[in-house]
Image: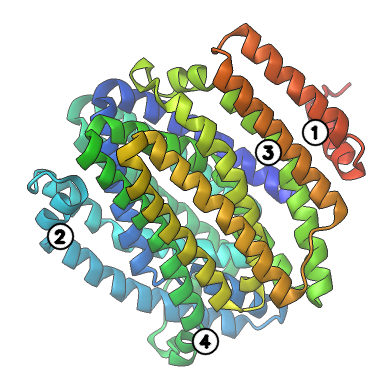
Amino acid sequence: MSFARAFSALTGASAVSMAAQVVRGKLAALLLGPAGVGVFNQLTLAWNIANVAGGLGTFNGIVQHGADALASGEKEALRRLSSTFTLLLGAVSLVIALAGVLSAAPLSHWLLHDEGAHAHLVALLMLGVPVGVTAQTWRALLSAGRAVSQLVRAQIASDLGGAVVFVALLFHFGLEGAVIGFMASHLILFLVQSLYIRRLFGPGHLIPRASGFSWRIVRANAGFGATGLLLIVLNNLAIIMVSRLVIDRLGPEANGYFANAWRLASVYLGAVTSTTIAYFLPTLARAEDDRAMAVEVNATLRFFLTLLPPVMTGIMAAGGLVVWLILSRAFAPVAVLLLVFVPAELGRIVADTILTQFLARRRLRPFALTYLVQFGLFISLSFALVPLLGVMGAALAYGAAMIVSMALALIAARASFSFRPEKRTLRAALIAALLLGATGAVCTHVAEGLLRYGLCLGAIGLWAALAWRDPEARALAQGALRRVRPSR
């Protein structure tokens, strides 16, 4: 399966996921309000950190080593890998779940400054950590085998099933129902992926063997684990810390605006990250040399820089409408924040794509250092700007951190792999930046309505005329037209 087809498949799953999240987000916005949605976001971010800690950051390492075992046809090596991490991560996640339940009250206060009022919800979420960790282990194995269709089906089942539970319980139990619905989606993912693991790799991968446990495999994955743990914990911790800053300075409603602007921009574009890990990393790992790897990276960058800018322009131009459809009128300030968060996500995606080279070549220090700088910059700028600019200060801090991260990724990749963006890639980046810059200027000075929509549509037209000169862009557009054209 080509990268474009893998991306299309995972984007299809993301579209279903987005539809499910739209339903959940709309109902949560109406029934819980900005403050309640902000609380729910803080709780789920805390679960994400516990889930990553329980997985010891090993996801990328399992993908890498699993891809190596499959490429060489070493079925027993894959079995040892599966047994080792199912046992190890299961034990670690159980310890974390128990610790989280016992410390639920102080965790609740640290997250929400609520004197432990939401401790019962923290404890409930912590109980689901072992299920989430095991589901991610199996997802890593499916990603190693580039089992895109199975990943897509599992994600769709999880999102739709979780949405049904979420909606059913939210009306009767409020925030408690939302938390149970969140946990239900991960339980469904666990169950569906177990079926696919059994079908693709055999039942031995579901039931680990104690004799298959190997400390050598653990040590070989230690670098990936430490780096992955650092990366994802920092990403979630950064949002939690900034959210807590916003709560202390501006109140829980303001945090509801910040949390949802970040979620709309980053979480709803999750197909890009999923594609990078599920398909792109194993592809780069199989590249013969740095030159071949650079060809793949440049092609992938052009793909993203061609596909995403017009979509992002639409979100920015119709921000008020998007917020009203997905949330409610009470979240109107989110639309302004999207003018910063959405283009910042393009910088994040570009940086992540470039940095995947370090994972493929197991050069983990530059990879980790870049994200450490990103984390430090986001936190420090937020503490400096939020008192001056309010929630927009947090958005600007996020945007600045993503831009710096992208620049550092380019510098590090050039120093390590002699990687340079090709002229066609630079051209795609330039016209993408011009489109998003023009959109931001229009949206800043023109109120949302037909005039703004018309101007942004014209900007997309000019961008398309420039992009059409690239043969890859033409092929991408023609392929999309063939998919939507009715068959005769």
Disc 3 vs disc 2: which is toward the camera? Answer: 3
Image coordinates of residue 95 in percent, x first then y, are 23, 72
Q: Earlier in the sequence, mark 1 or mark 4?
A: 4
Which residue shows up at 92% across the image and 43% down it?
A: 471
Residue closest to the eye, 386 or 63: 386
Let me know if residue 169 appears in the view: no
Q: Secondary structure at mark 4?
A: helix
* Circles 3, 2 touching at the beta carbon (< 8 Å): no
Which residue shows up at 49% across the image and 73% down it?
A: 205
Q: Earlier in the sequence, mark 3 or mark 4?
A: 4
Q: Which residue is mark 1?
A: 480
Image coordinates of residue 440 in percent, x first then y, are 60, 28
Calculate the distance from the C-alpha at mark 3 to the C-alpha at mark 2. Answer: 41 Å
Calculate the distance from the C-alpha at mark 3 to the C-alpha at mark 4. Answer: 36 Å
Based on the displayed image, in which of its 4 quarters is residue 313 positioned?
top right
Crowd tier of the residue under label 2, counting other residues whose Cα lies within 10 Å: few below 14, some 14–19, many 20 or above: some
* Circles 1, 2 touching at the beta carbon (< 8 Å): no
Which residue shows up at 70% across the image and 75% down it?
A: 415
Q: Earlier in the sequence, mark 1 or mark 2?
A: 2
Q: Which residue is mark 2?
A: 101
Q: Amino acid at mark 3?
A: Leu
Q: Amino acid at mark 4?
A: Ala
Q: Residue 220 has which mark?
A: 4
Above or below, 304 against 32 in this view is below
In the rendered image, the quadrant that contains the C terminus is top right
Disc 1 vs disc 3: which is toward the camera? Answer: 3
Residue closest to the eye, 231 or 389: 389
Q: Secondary structure at mark 2?
A: helix
Above or below, 273 against 90 in this view is above
Image coordinates of residue 372 in percent, x first then y, are 46, 66
